[in-house]
Image: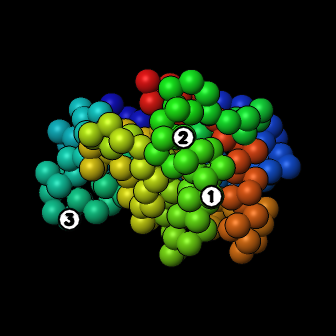
Amino acid sequence: MAFTLPELPYAKDALAPHISAETLEYHHGKHHNTYVTNLNNLIDGTPMAEWSLEELVTRSGEAPADKRAGLFNNAAQHFNHSFYWKSLRPAGGSGPEGALAAAIDSTFGGVDAFKEQFTKTAVTHFGSGWAWLVKESGGALAIVGTHDAGCPITDGATPLLTCDVWEHAYYIDYRNARPAYLENFWALANWDFAADNFA
Ligand code: MN3
């Protein structure tokens, strides 16, 4: 079954001034859309057309050798971007509550310490990739950086929240200033989404 570009869960101008409508126009309408188109072209007419997106990400090694890299990259980027749009919200940023807040406190020593570590992972990540808050397969919280299309579900982790640190995510609004993009990420972080994923 062919994949479709998911609608953004908010209006294109709803994340401004932190992330502009122009950024979303390109990032969602062009970049993400291209990953979806490429993925559909790779699986069309093959048995992989029956696989779920998660299966395509975690089982790309079973694909024909000449398709493996493209399949993983485009499937994982479709997964990662769909997850990123939901990791943001116009009225985000307040902070975690309940069980997730307690786990963040005990793991990182508080929300501010968590944000500091996550920001450091995102800002110091070399080149293109992603910063994630995940629940590892054993249940512990962790901050992980993944390169290019890297996706934590390949390690059996459950993603809770992500920040896209590819330049296309921030170059229109912040040029090369990834730290400024991260500062603004915290004004948009969707903690309800993270809590739902943690539960
Ligand atoms: Mn991106």
> Dot 1 corresponds to which residue?
116
Location of residue 30 in the rendering, given as x and y in whole percent from the top left corner: 61, 53
Q: Indicate the secondary structure of the residue bearing disc 2.
A: helix
In the image, what residue type sits under mark 1?
Glu
Q: Indicate the secondary structure of the residue bearing disc 3.
A: helix
First-in-chain label (1 vs 2)? 2
Residue visible at 62% across and 58% down in the picture = 116
- Distance from disc 3 to disc 2, alpha carbons, whole Å, reads 45 Å
Q: Indicate the secondary structure of the residue bearing disc 1.
A: helix
Residue visible at 22% across and 51% down in the picture = 60
28 vs 86, nearest the viewer? 86
Count neighbours of disc 1 (C-alpha within 10 A) and say few if under 14, some if 14 to 19, many if 20 or more.
few
Q: Nearer the viewer, mark 1 or mark 2?
A: 2
Location of residue 57 in the rendering, given as x and y in whole percent from the top left corner: 30, 47
Q: Quadrant of the C terminus?
A: top left
Count neighbours of disc 3 (C-alpha within 10 A) and say few if under 14, some if 14 to 19, many if 20 or more.
few
- Distance from disc 1 to disc 3, alpha carbons, whole Å, reads 41 Å
> Dot 2 corresponds to which residue?
105
Is residue 70 among the parts visible in the rendering? yes
Q: Nearer the viewer, mark 1 or mark 3?
A: 1
First-in-chain label (1 vs 3)? 3
- 122 displayed left or right of 133: right
Residue furthest to the right: 17
- Against 31, is 190 above or below? above
Where residue 173 sits, quadrant-wise, is bottom right
Q: Nearer the viewer, mark 3 or mark 2?
A: 2
> Dot 3 corresponds to which residue?
66
In the image, what residue type sits under mark 3?
Asp
Count neighbours of disc 2 (C-alpha within 10 A) and say few if under 14, some if 14 to 19, many if 20 or more.
some
- 151 displayed left or right of 104: left
Q: Is the shortest distance between ligand 1 and the CB of mark 3 under 8 Å?
A: no
